[in-house]
Amino acid sequence: MAKRVRITVGVWLALAGGLARAQAPASGPTFEVASIKPSPQVTPAMMAAGSIHAGMKIDAARVDIGMLSLMDLICKAYEVKSYQVSGPGWLGVQRFDIMAKIPEGGTKEQVPQMLQALLAERFKLVVHRDTKEHAVYALVPAKGGVKMKESEADPAPAASAAPGAPAPPASTGSSQVTVNASAKGTVVTDGQGGQTKMSMSPDGKSMRMESSKITMAQLAEGLSRFLDRPVVDMTELKGNYQATLDLSIQDLMNAARAAGMAAPSAGAAAGGGADSARPADAASDSSPTSIFNSVQNLGLKLESRKMPLQLIIVDSAEKAPTEN
């Protein structure tokens, strides 16, 4: 069970105006060429070897995408969070590897527009935008103050080899992920200097997730995957922090199923019982591994609120892309 949970959660981590008429993206920049293939199935051996190809890397000439679902790709293309995309559940099931060439004169800032065009062409994606009042959880500091430590500052970039020499090509926008698993747990590296270590409790009933470098916006987006509504960062905290969350098996299975992955029911994973039927976001949950208590241990809290959210509504899409 522990190994299956590590694999499920590790892969899941590798992966977060007014009404307009349905539309494909407006004419704009496109990739010179692009190849789309289904991602290979992840195995324990791949995780142990750290050979998982996941995330997105952008350099001056190409975009290298690994193990992203159509939901993930829509988020990248339209620069929104997953909770801002409304569409069928299968959007998060199949994952794809994409290798695309940026045309001469193209820039990394144009990659989202190029992805929009690619999704419209290859997946026949049609969307429209909308703004709706939505129930959310506001992530705010708790009474008594924040209990997290700030992460160490990133080292200064290396100087050029010679005065006036051009800097090496940037890799801005990258989120290339590496996953390494062992008997002690799983370590996910995000490609931007941050690491998340995941380890099961001795009794196998909870998982500890320790992040060495995370912004409050990233924390809010991650928490959204475990709850029934979006979490919006309203902490006004800047910079990066060290954060540890203790999550129950129920929380993990809920998140895995929400991401389109096969996972046993919360009751089966937790061994049944009355508590197993409770919703994952129950604010009154007294379990020491509940999400609400874990957030409170960071010196933060989740408050129920309503606010307008800008949404991407998926009107139609194909499950598989057209051939390369």
Image: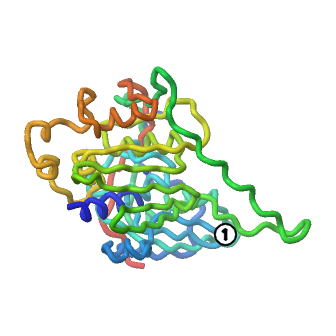
Q: Which of the pair 204/20 is nearer the observer?
A: 204
- Quadrant occupied by the C terminus: bottom left
Q: Residue at x 38, y 62 (%)?
A: 186
Q: Which of the pair 27/83 is nearer the observer?
A: 83
Q: By what rule are the colours in the image chosen?
A: rainbow
Whole-percent x, y for residue 16 in the image: 43, 51
Q: Which of the pair 165/104 is nearer the observer?
A: 165
Report helix, strand or loop for mark 1: loop
Whole-percent x, y for residue 230 in the image: 37, 37
Whole-percent x, y for residue 104 in the image: 68, 72
Q: Which of the pair 219/151 is nearer the observer?
A: 151
Q: Residue at x 12, y 47 (%)?
A: 267
Please, which residue is most extreme toward the right here? 163
Please, which residue is most extreme toward the front here? 202
Q: Residue at x 24, y 38 (%)?
A: 280
Tally of numbered discs: 1
Q: Which residue is mark 1?
A: 60
Against 85, residue 287 (above or below) is: above
Whole-percent x, y for residue 243 in the image: 47, 43
- Quadrant occupied by the N terminus: bottom left
Against 83, residue 139 (above or below) is: above
Please, which residue is most extreme toward the top here? 143
How crowded pointer 1 is (Cα within 10 Å; few <14, some 14-19, many 20+) is rated as some
The answer to which quarter of the image holds residue 130 is top left
Q: Residue at x 39, y 31 (%)?
A: 296
Amino acid type, residue under disc 1 in the picture: Ala
Q: Is residue 203 left or right of residue 274?
A: right
Q: Is residue 170 left or right of residue 183?
A: right
